[in-house]
Amino acid sequence: MTGSRIILALDVPDRKRALEVASAVSPYISYIKINWPLVLAAGTDIIRDLGEFRPVICDLKLADIPNTLKLIADEISKRSPFGVIAHAFVGSDCLKELVNHSPEMKVFAVVAMSHPGSRDVMDSQVDRLIDIARSSGVYGVVAPANKPDLLSRVRKMMPDTVIISPGSGAQGGDPVEGIRAGADFIIVGRSLYGAADPAKEAQRLMITTSSR
């Protein structure tokens, strides 16, 4: 690990560009998070390829019955990711299936999201979602840096759990404020891969957040 508190959200649906950005910023980040756009565009082997630069977290936001999650975990784990992200709202039986079925793959549960629409339902259910995640034995949770009050609440309820936080940069959150609110790692996407010089911007963010 670099000691960086930055996770690159590599939402670039282009294999060549994804590898270029990952190579450029790898000295300044700790993990690479990929989502469906890149997996669908480049195939699942991109997980292993990006893992040559930094450990990969598969942000698949899994939400299905336990048996389906087991089948997905079987396939994803063949590519040796560091972790996978699933929704907590599907219940503890689903999360426990992931946690127990592929113990080498860390499970992160989404307990709150960064977009405005999450206020419609999810934000009002944070306490319950935290209870589900906590009882399932997940490695970490996802909670938004652009909602620092909510993030602080998650940290207070889960003092020993790893929190990774989207919502900084393009979504308006401040990475330093996110760390102060309780995030262990700040997830940054467009502000990095869309920068004129992704490496320079990643280095700036690493320096800005590492002293907090």
Image (tube, helix red, strand yellow):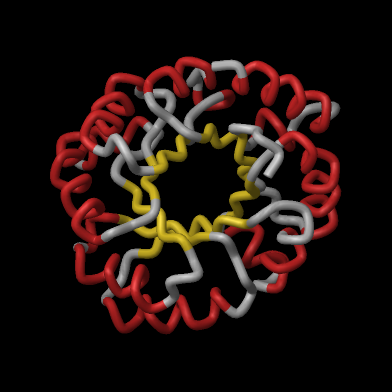
From this view, report whether residue 105 is shown above or below residue 9. below
Quarter in which the C terminus is drawn: top right
Q: Which residue occupies the foreground of this view, 66 or 116?
A: 66
From this view, report whether residue 181 is shown above or below residue 25. above
| Drawn side of residue 59 relative to residue 9, left or right | left
From this view, report whether residue 190 is shown above or below residue 55. above
At a point 85% along the width and 57% down the height, the residue shown is: 16
From this view, report whether residue 9 is shown above or below residue 66. above
Asked where in the image residue 14 lies, by quadrant, the reply is bottom right
Total marks shown come to 0
Asked where in the image residue 108 lies, by quadrant, the reply is bottom left
Residue 134: image location, x then y, percent: 23, 51
Asked where in the image residue 162 lies, by quadrant, the reply is top left
Q: Which residue occupies the foreground of this view, 133 or 1?
A: 1
Quarter in which the N terminus is drawn: top right
Residue 122: image location, x then y, percent: 23, 41
Residue 138: image location, x then y, percent: 33, 57
At a point 38% along the width and 78% down the height, the residue shown is: 101
At a point 74% along the width and 59% down the height, the residue shown is: 50
Q: Which residue occupies the foreground of this view, 21 or 157?
A: 157
| Drawn side of residue 44 relative to residue 71, left or right | right
At a point 39% along the width and 54% down the height, the residue shown is: 139
Residue 2: image location, x then y, percent: 71, 39
